[in-house]
């Protein structure tokens, strides 16, 4: 349920409503928008339905939320959420934000060379896995804390931010210490304890859509994080499993404009994992910008043949640079910058 307040609602009136909601055993979340303040009521709606909340001073309207997610919904927040990643970089506004780097952190030297190129080309955030979710236990599992350290050092030296995956709630503090943005991987989208854990974090969360997750399930996972207190969730479409086997996954670009209607959260597209093929990354990155993505996540490796993971979908650094200049006019044509 959403309580829309009158423009002139006072703090005292807001406190009074919040108190009432809490007395009913429910939680409230306040969103102060440009035009209005809105109170989201979290919990069993049946309890509040019998309460005449409309008559409370300061209340303009009470809207039952039909979508199963509330805080992530457009009904809850009309304006796009602009999420700060640092004091100078935010996502969800006019500028399209680029997250780029190798699939896995392999060595400091390699990360430094990729970091320099992607920064020069216009990327804002360095990506790289230090904890890798691999299908086979015999595949490279990541460098762990050493990888996190390299990410931080390279990012600080090049002026980038860091996004990296958190797989285990026990590593939360460790990852928070090194990363600016915490990534939750596709395979963990319904690891609800992990979602609750990052819901308590102060860092923004980069939530990747599960390969088997519907849009509804994707938004419900975001709702887990927001309802635990962290409103800074960035959604990432990274391809889903379909009957098609010619590509690694099927990049669901429908999801971009669809989610932007259903939710106020920023949407990033990852055409690297979404296609699994380096020569499809560019075309799908362009399509993603054209259909309204707020950012792109792209894997870049100087020697894909030798990459520890996902070489087949990684762009050479010079190809990433070329792609950046090709994306600029497409971004401009949809009223964005890159
Ligand atoms: C990644 O981005 O490093 C990754 C493992 O992607 P996904 O979780 O989408 O498979
Ligand atoms: Mn990868």
Image (cartoon, grey):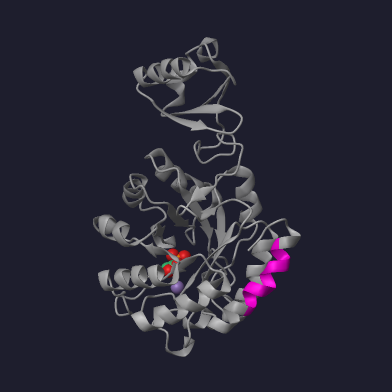
Residue 284 in the image: state x and y as whole percent.
64, 70
Question: In the shown orientation, is residue 230 left or right of residue 66?
Answer: left
In the image, 95 versus 45, the foreground residue is 95
Find out whether residue 161 is within the magenta segment: no
Residue, x 33% and y 73% (percent of image)?
150
When the figure is inspected, residue 77 is found, relative to residue 159, above or below; the finding is: above
Residue 134 in the image: state x and y as whole percent.
36, 72
Residue, x 72% and y 55% (percent of image)?
335
Residue 334 image-quadrant placement = bottom right
When the figure is inspected, residue 159 is found, relative to residue 117, above or below; the finding is: above
Find the magenta span and give its range: 322-331
Q: Image quadrant for the C terminus? A: bottom right
Question: In the shown orientation, is residue 175 left or right of residue 226?
Answer: left
Residue 261 in the image: state x and y as whole percent.
64, 45
Residue 57 in the image: state x and y as whole percent.
52, 11
Residue 84 visible in the current orientation: yes
Q: Main secondary structure of the magenta part?
A: helix
């Amino acid at each position: 349920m959403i309580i829309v307040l009158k423009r002139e609602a006072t703090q005292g009136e807001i406190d009074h409503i919040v108190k009432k909601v809490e007395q009913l055993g429910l939680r409230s979340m306040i969103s102060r928008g440009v035009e209005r303040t809105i109170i989201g009521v979290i919990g069993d709606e049946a309890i509040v339905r019998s309460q005449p909340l409309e008559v409370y001073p300061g209340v303009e309207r009470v809207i039952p939320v039909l979508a199963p997610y509330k805080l992530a919904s457009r009904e809850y927040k009309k304006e796009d959420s602009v999420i700060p990643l640092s004091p100078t970089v935010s996502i969800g506004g006019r500028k399209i934000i680029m997250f780029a780097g190798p699939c896995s952190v392999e060595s400091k030297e390699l990360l430094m060379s990729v970091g320099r190129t992607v920064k020069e080309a216009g990327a804002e955030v360095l990506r790289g896995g230090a904890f890798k979710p691999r299908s086979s236990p015999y595949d490279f599992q990541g460098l762990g804390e050493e990888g996190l350290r390299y990410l931080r050092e390279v990012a600080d030296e090049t002026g980038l931010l860091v996004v990296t995956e958190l797989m285990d709630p026990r590593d939360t503090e460790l990852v928070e210490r090194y990363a600016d943005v915490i990534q939750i991987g596709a395979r963990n989208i319904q690891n609800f304890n992990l979602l609750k854990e990052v819901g308590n974090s102060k860092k923004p969360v980069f939530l990747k859509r599960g390969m088997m997750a519907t849009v509804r399930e994707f938004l419900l996972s975001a709702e887990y994080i927001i309802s635990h207190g962290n409103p800074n969730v960035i959604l990432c479409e990274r391809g889903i499993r379909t009957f098609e086997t010619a590509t690694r996954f099927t990049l669901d670009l429908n999801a971009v404009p669809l989610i932007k209607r259903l939710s106020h959260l920023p949407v990033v597209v990852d055409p690297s994992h979404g296609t699994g093929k380096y020569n499809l990354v560019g075309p799908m990155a362009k399509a993603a910008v054209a259909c309204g993505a707020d950012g792109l996540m792209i894997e870049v490796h100087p020697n894909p043949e030798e990459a520890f993971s996902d070489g087949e979908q990684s762009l050479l650094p010079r190809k990433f640079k070329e792609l950046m200049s090709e994306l600029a006019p497409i971004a401009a044509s949809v009223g964005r910058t890159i």
